[in-house]
């Protein structure tokens, strides 16, 4: 490895909201993608959150690798610290928030029959 990004790296963006509710891009990086999976790295600054959403064709598995994340899956909300993970079943509403004072970084593994970004149902 020469330090350059691996083939298939791509910059994407998701929608995040700051502490005042203003929409702003949340940087996500696609690390690797296959026909039925995608692995992304997602970073949220302190006070940012993603919208409450669900997917009809994919499930997600989140692993926190830096910071503390507040996750909502369905009606349950809990904190995840570095090294902890959560599974988001197909069709379940979910949200990621950064309640801390440091950035939160997680690895998201999407799996399913359809992985395009238009497989999103927004709930707020």
Image (tube, helix red, strand yellow):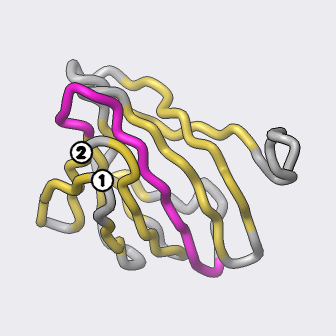
Q: Which residue is mark 1?
A: 82
Q: Which residue is mark 2?
A: 68
Q: Quadrant of residue 18?
A: top left
Q: Residue at x 20, y 49 (%)?
A: 70
What's the magenta region?
98-113
The residue furthest front is 1
Q: Is residue 52 left or right of residue 42?
A: left
First of labels 2, 1 by sequence position:
2
Q: Is residue 61 left or right of residue 95?
A: right
Q: Residue at x 75, y 43 (%)?
A: 10
Q: Contact, CB < 8 Å: mark 2 with mark 1?
A: yes
Q: Is residue 99 left or right of residue 15?
A: left
Q: Specify whether residue 112 is painted magenta.
A: yes
Q: Nearer the viewer, residue 34 or 55?
A: 34
Q: Quadrant of residue 12?
A: top right
Query: Mark 1: which secondary structure?
Result: loop
Query: Mark 2: which secondary structure?
Result: strand
Q: Nearer the viewer, residue 27 or 112?
A: 27
- Percent across and percent down for residue 7 are 87, 52
Q: Specify whether residue 32 is painted magenta.
A: no
| Count of numbered marks | 2
As drawn, 111 above or below 17: below
Q: Characterize the local packing of mark 2: few (<14), some (14-19) or many (20 or more) Cα atoms within 10 angstroms.
A: many
- Percent across and percent down for residue 91 are 38, 74
């Amino acid at each position: 490895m020469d330090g350059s990004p691996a083939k298939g790296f791509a910059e994407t963006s998701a929608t995040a909201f700051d502490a005042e509710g203003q929409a702003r891009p949340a940087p996500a990086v696609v690390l690797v993608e296959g026909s039925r999976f995608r692995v992304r790295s997602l970073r949220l600054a302190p006070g940012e959150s993603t919208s409450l959403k669900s997917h009809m064709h994919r499930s997600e598995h989140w692993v926190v690798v830096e910071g503390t994340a507040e996750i909502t899956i369905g009606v349950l909300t809990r904190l995840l610290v570095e090294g902890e993970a959560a599974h988001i079943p197909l069709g379940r509403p979910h949200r990621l928030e950064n309640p801390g004072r440091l950035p939160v970084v997680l690895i998201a593994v999407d799996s399913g029959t359809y992985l395009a970004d238009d497989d999103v149902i927004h709930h707020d």
